[in-house]
Image (tube, grey):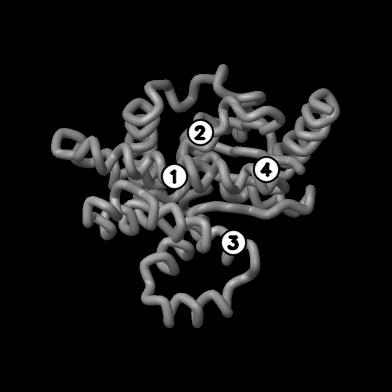
Amino acid sequence: MPVITINGVIGSGTLEIGHLVAQNLGLNYVDRYIFSEAARLVGSPVGQLIEKEQRVVPFRERVARFMQGVLERSAVAGAGAEPYFGRGIEMLPAEAYTELVSDAASSSPVHDRAFIDATTSVIKELAASGDVVIIGRGSNMILADEPGVVHVGLVAPMEVRIDTMAKREMFSNAEARAYAEDLENARLTFYRKFFRVSANDPTNFHLMLNIGRISQSTAAEIIGHATEDIATAAA
């Protein structure tokens, strides 16, 4: 029941490599789109929730159902601040942390704690089910003490990051650079704020790969081999 987290600098190819790893190993894949869809389901009226659930795959339905339970139990819901939770989940994709760190001075400690607690619960539930690749969201720190989880870090030179973001988001090179720089600064702040660590500290990963030196497909193969070795050692 492999569990793999992949985190890295903005534009290093976490989403693309995560997809390849999931395909190669036959695992479920969780990135910003599934979390965003689940958040929308959670925020829907019951009738719409049931209707929408019938149109999502079972794994997404499981994520949505769990997130609904987390929301109902969370301090955010109790404080009458449900929109913050829903908005926070949707605005914290694997590569977009700006929402939570853009106004740190006025950020509510209660909201911060409730948000990270809910995110932690969701990620730990996904990990407990096994057979999953989890992209971003500080998942390596949230699951740092969970045995058998493989944590992968990615780095890449700016020219590679620009190319990745330009292709993924249909940006010009100038737009891709600005996007990558802004969101990387926000990602670094997110790690400092919530985990008190440097986001790119190699000691927080089992392996760190430089996508400027190897292809995405080679990176996925390396991650697969490392996962097999770690699983064997843990057995």
Q: Is residue 231 left or right of residue 52?
A: right
Query: Which residue does the numbered mark 1 point to in the structure image?
Result: 119
Q: Secondary structure at mark 4?
A: helix
Instruction: Determine which of the numbered discs, if any, sits on residue 62 in the image.
Output: 3
Local crowd size for mark 3, using a 10 Å CA cut-off: few (<14), some (14–19), many (≥20): some
* Distance from the alpha carbon under mark 3 to that under mark 2: 20 Å
Q: Which amino acid type corresponds to the residue marked 3 in the rendered image?
A: Arg
Q: Position of residue 182 (x, y in %)?
A: 32, 40
Q: Are marks 4 and 1 in contact (CB under 8 Å)?
A: no
Q: Secondary structure at mark 1?
A: helix
* Distance from the alpha carbon under mark 3 to that under mark 1: 15 Å
Q: Are marks 1 and 2 in contact (CB under 8 Å)?
A: yes
Q: Nearer the viewer, residue 177 or 68?
A: 68
Query: Which residue does the numbered mark 4 point to in the structure image?
Result: 216
* Of pointers 3 and 2, the one earlier in the residue sequence: 3
Q: Which amino acid type corresponds to the residue marked 4 in the rendered image?
A: Gln
* Residue at image coords 55%, 22%: 204
Local crowd size for mark 1, using a 10 Å CA cut-off: few (<14), some (14–19), many (≥20): many
Report how many numbered discs are placed on residues in the image: 4
